[in-house]
Image (cartoon, grey):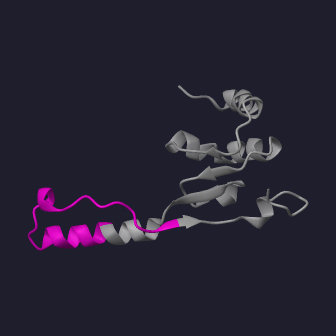
Amino acid sequence: MPSYQTFPLAFARMVTDRMQAVYIIGGPFIFSVRGRIAELGVRHRLPTAYPWRAGPEAGGLPYGANPQEAWYRAAVYVDKILKGAKPADLPVEQPTQFEALVCFWSSPPDGRIN
């Protein structure tokens, strides 16, 4: 079971290993501790990106599929099924729109982004 107490050690190791950035993936646990992760990223000067928009609110950078587009595409699927299409006959789609936001309040104090 993951524990957020291990995060400082993990970030220290990433600095030792000369990592240049961190991309966070995960589920509800990671989402619930996103602020702690972003705080450690700032402290260790590691840009931290998330696959959801809540990243900037926590102090990180979001990069991922556009959630509104995903919901729209899901509605299109439901519409096709309700009109008689067999779910097994519908193609699997990949996201086509991605978002990348820059949060200026989480940028370095000198304003430079390296």
Residue at image position (66%, 57%) is 61
Q: Nearer the viewer, residue 28 or 9?
A: 9
Left or right for 108, reference 33:
right
Q: Is residue 85 magenta?
A: yes
Please identify the quarter of the rendering in which residue 15 is found.
top right
Q: Count the labels in the image.
A: 0
Q: Is residue 27 above or below residue 55?
A: above
Q: Is residue 1 above or below residue 20?
A: above
- List x then y, in percent, for residue 22: 65, 44
Please identify the quarter of the rendering in which residue 4 is found.
top right
- List x then y, in percent, for residue 45: 80, 45
Residue at image position (53%, 25%) is 1
Residue at image position (79%, 56%) is 114
Left or right for 74, reference 89:
right
Q: Which residues are magenta?
A: 74-98
Q: Is residue 78 magenta?
A: yes
Left or right for 60, reference 111:
left
- List x then y, in percent, for residue 68: 44, 70
Q: Nearer the viewer, residue 103 or 5?
A: 103
Please identify the quarter of the rendering in which residue 30 is found.
top right
Which residue, as the protein is rendered here, is positioned at the far right? 110
Left or right for 49, reference 65:
right
- List x then y, in percent, for residue 110: 91, 60
Residue at image position (46%, 65%) is 67
